């Protein structure tokens, strides 16, 4: 758990809770506690039509300017004909801020403790004031879609407080209230209604009800507040909805309060049962075993982060903090993206569920040239695959809107999306920033999450449900690819760029566009390969298109190595405008792609190493998410020591006191990329070498704590769920394997010359045996096996 001995004075110290749809940052203050609320359908404005009209008419000229090296003219044409109008998509907004006033000054409180229980999804506070112990528990119930705030006092009739709600921005010290109506009723309920603003916006309602458990207490509605006196226990319930999902958000919110109130005695336990079940699917202990019920010897969470910052040159980090960080990352993903019984059609934004500002950085949207994808890197491997369903819901809406964008901008079939989208699944270009805006591969990249989900889960239904989405993205690419201007034999994307990066022309001026950047070619190759497999698995639905895909795939330009031994990023070798750039887009094929590996493509892997070293020499990895990407890249290169050094830098330089990622400012993708990197150090199933699963492929050698540990419930491609332990850097017997899909299993245990056998766990029946480090056997769906050696 995350632990603190002080109340949160800023948002960076508050603790997040969420049920995928409704969340809060909990401050845990004694005088006036604060819940900063979010609900994931509260966005400024509504759907816009922003496609640049008739852009496709200018596409041939733009391509010719790029071929002729007339970069200035190409950029002028892009500004004129290819940027969207209006420029920007919609942005995510906060819900409101609930204040609970107690009047207990922190200086007068004793034995103050504040913690976030990651196992059961509760934020808790305990302290004593005037010899009375006051306790609070806050949670966001997915089953009832409400936030519960439970209060108690150790002495009868000694709990008094005032509850109020306002739609103000405390983070930016904004004093305006962005709401339409605010009042309290005789039913111990506060009603706040609001219109986010902008054309076609979705009005909403936030409703709060206060329930006390003793007859001696008084509860009064005063103006827009609820005043409670002389209670012993009380519960505050919070619900919210907008017209994005329902025609009458006020009635929906009140109905949820009523349903939760009717089950008040079971509300907490039902939440704990539901949340704990999902959190318990995976567990990591590096350097253990730890007795996690005894925290007396460990620093508080904020103390641990401060200590790391003081020792910022350290290349390591305490194992218990790594374990906590990984568990916290899983907690965050579940809290901001779980699908649940109500469903969830909005995935994690740049800030997950917890945007603090009405004017958030980058609009707190979905940035799909790395950040949204990174949010879901750990979903499958960390045994939270269901969290991707929200992403697939958005992807389906993008595919519908993206058909018009594909026709209007490129005269292509299928659908396309650029480097951003919003709640309305906007697929037009975002902003007018040349190095990023006109990049039509964002949708194609997102489609690969469908294929990856299937590889981990073996669920054909996912492929059936999303086939048309992937099909549409492939159709667009088939039409969009053109022969390169130098040889004519390769098919390339044009216009193309390497997201957010810039090169230098021979005259020293910066350049953006090219014919077929490396990341473009890698994504196209990967999507074509995935679609060929998907179509085959679903019964050869489209043989004519598959023939086209295979022909186009064979003409994609191979990756190339430059004069320094580095992997080339653009269509030719250029000097770099920013050698330490935060994006390492041309290494996409190493991670998250699987086209490059030290075993299958050693020359390309070595080129990736040189690229990473050159970036590091110029200050690369200076943002939280980019540092997290480096952990994954070095893990794929089997260099655990480098991966651990970047993990240490991520925690010491880019992590807030509440363990959220600091871009800066706060951006949640670094958390998810970070835990993905840790798991990649311990288990890999992505190498292009016969579908093997590798155990401890990038175990660090520079830190003795990492030499022992255990990992249960981690998932691998092929549809396998694994549990194993290691000691002195070696995997120890037995390895537990659960087969979800009934595929052939090939596990590299990393030790030559071992006698091994595989038995069915339920019957202890031996089904395979051998000698060496590669364990191979044919599994049966939904069966568990033990590998013994």
Image (cartoon, rainbow, N blue to C red):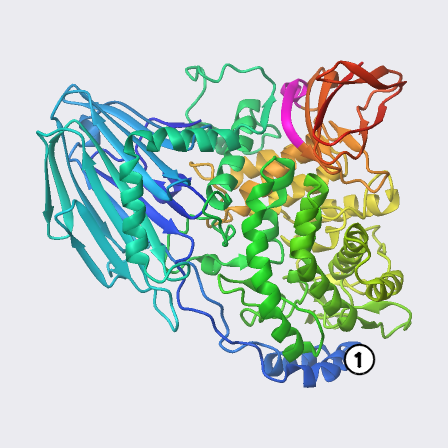
Regarding residue 220, the answer to whether it shows in the image is: yes
Regarding residue 641, the answer to whether it shows in the image is: no
Front residue (pair 20, 417): 20
For disc 1, the neighbor class at 10 Å (few under 14, some 14 to 19, many from 20) is: few
Is residue 709 shown in magenta? yes
Q: Residue at x 22, y 53 (%)?
A: 191
Which quarter of the rendered picture does the C terminus lie within?
Answer: top right
Measured as percent of width and height from the top left, residue 421 is found at 54, 63
At mark 1, the secondary structure is loop
Could you tell whether 787 is left or right of 37 in the image? right
Q: Residue at x 63, y 24 (%)?
A: 712
Tell me if residue 526 comes above or below residue 731 in the rendering. Answer: below
Front residue (pair 624, 283): 283
Residue labelled with disc 1: 68
How many numbered marks, from 0 up?
Answer: 1
Q: Residue at x 50, y 43 (%)?
A: 338
Tell me if residue 104 comes above or below residue 243 in the rendering. Answer: above
Front residue (pair 467, 773): 467
Measured as percent of width and height from the top left, residue 463 is found at 69, 51
Is residue 611 shown in magenta? no
Could you tell whether 512 is left or right of 68 in the image? left
Which quarter of the rendered picture does the N terminus lie within?
Answer: top left
Measured as percent of width and height from the top left, residue 686 is found at 76, 40
Q: Quadrant of residue 316?
A: top right
Residues rendered magenta in the picture: 703-714
């Amino acid at each position: 758990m995350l632990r603190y001995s002080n109340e949160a004075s800023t948002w960076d110290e508050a603790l997040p809770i969420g049920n995928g749809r409704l969340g809060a940052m909990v401050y845990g203050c004694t005088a006036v506690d604060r819940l900063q609320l979010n609900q994931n359908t509260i966005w400024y404005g509504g759907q816009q039509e922003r496609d640049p009209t008739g852009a496709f008419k200018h596409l041939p000229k733009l391509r010719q300017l790029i071929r002729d090296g007339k970069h200035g003219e190409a950029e002028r044409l892009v500004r004129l004909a290819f940027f969207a109008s209006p420029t920007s998509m919609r942005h995510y907004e906060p819900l409101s801020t609930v204040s609970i006033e107690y009047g207990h000054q922190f200086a007068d409180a004793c034995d103050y403790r504040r913690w976030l229980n990651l196992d059961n999804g509760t934020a808790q506070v305990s302290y004593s004031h005037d010899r009375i112990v006051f306790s609070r528990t806050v949670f966001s119930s997915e089953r009832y879609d409400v936030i519960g705030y439970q209060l108690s006092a150790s002495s009868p009739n000694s709990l008094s407080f005032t509850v109020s709600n306002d739609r103000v921005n405390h983070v930016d010290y904004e004093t305006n209230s962005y709401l339409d109506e605010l009042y309290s009723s005789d039913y111990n309920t506060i009603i706040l209604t609001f219109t986010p603003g902008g054309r076609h916006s979705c009005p909403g309602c936030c409703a709060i009800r206060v329930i006390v458990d003793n007859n001696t207490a008084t509860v009064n509605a005063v103006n827009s507040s609820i005043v409670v006196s002389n209670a012993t226990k009380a519960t505050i319930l919070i619900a919210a909805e907008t017209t994005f999902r329902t025609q009458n958000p006020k009635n929906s919110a009140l109905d949820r309060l009523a349903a939760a109130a009717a089950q008040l005695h079971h509300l907490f336990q039902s939440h704990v049962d539901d949340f704990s079940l999902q959190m318990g699917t995976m567990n990591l202990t590096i350097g253990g075993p730890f007795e996690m019920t005894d925290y007396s010897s460990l620093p508080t969470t904020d103390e641990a982060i401060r200590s790391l910052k003081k020792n910022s040159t350290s290349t390591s980090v305490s194992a218990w903090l790594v374990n906590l960080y990984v568990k916290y990352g899983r907690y965050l993903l579940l809290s901001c993206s779980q699908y649940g019984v109500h469903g969830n059609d909005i995935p994690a934004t740049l800030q997950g569920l917890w945007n603090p500002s009405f004017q958030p950085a980058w609009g707190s949207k979905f940035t799909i040239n790395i950040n949204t994808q990174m949010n879901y890197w750990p979903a499958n491997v960390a045994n939270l695959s269901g969290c991707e369903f929200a992403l697939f819901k958005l992807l389906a809406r993008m595919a519908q809107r993206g058909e018009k964008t594909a026709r209007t901008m490129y005269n292509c079939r299928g659908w396309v999306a650029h480097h951003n989208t919003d709640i309305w699944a906007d697929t037009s270009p975002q902003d007018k920033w040349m190095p990023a805006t006109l990049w039509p591969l964002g949708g194609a990249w997102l489609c690969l999450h469908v294929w990856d989900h299937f590889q981990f889960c073996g669920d054909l239904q996912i492929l059936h449900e999303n086939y048309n989405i992937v099909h549409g993205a492939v159709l667009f690419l088939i039409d969009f690819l053109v022969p390169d201007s130098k040889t004519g034999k390769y098919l390339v994307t044009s216009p193309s760029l390497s997201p957010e990066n810039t090169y230098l022309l021979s005259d020293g001026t910066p350049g953006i566009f090219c014919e077929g950047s490396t990341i473009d070619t890698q994504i196209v190759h990967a999507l074509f390969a995935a679609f060929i497999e998907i179509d085959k698995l679903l019964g050869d639905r489209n043989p004519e298109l598959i023939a086209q895909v295979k022909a186009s795939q064979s003409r994609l330009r191979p990756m190339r190595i430059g004069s320094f031994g580095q992997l080339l990023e653009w269509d030719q070798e250029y000097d770099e405008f920013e050698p330490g750039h935060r994006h390492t887009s041309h290494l996409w094929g190493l991670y998250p792609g699987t086209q490059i590996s030290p075993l299958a493509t050693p020359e390309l892997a070595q080129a990736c190493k040189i690229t990473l070293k050159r970036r590091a020499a110029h200050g690369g990895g200076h943002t939280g998410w980019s540092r997290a990407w480096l952990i994954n890249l070095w893990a794929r290169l089997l260099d655990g020591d480098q991966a651990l050094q970047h993990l240490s830098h991520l925690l010491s330089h880019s992590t807030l006191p509440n363990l959220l990622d600091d871009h800066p400012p706060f951006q949640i993708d670094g958390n998810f990329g970070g835990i993905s990197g840790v798991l990649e150090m311990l288990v890999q199933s992505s190498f292009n070498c016969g579908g093997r699963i590798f155990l401890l492929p990038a175990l660090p050698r520079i830190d003795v704590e990492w030499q022992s540990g255990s990992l249960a419930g981690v998932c691998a491609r092929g549809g396998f769920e694994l549990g194993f332990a290691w000691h002195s850097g070696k995997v120890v017997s037995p390895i537990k394997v659960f087969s979800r899909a009934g595929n052939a299993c090939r596990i590299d245990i990393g030790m030559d010359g071992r006698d091994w056998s595989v038995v069915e766990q339920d019957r202890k029946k031996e089904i395979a045996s051998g000698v060496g480090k590669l364990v191979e056997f044919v599994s049966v769906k939904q069966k568990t096996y033990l590998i013994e050696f």
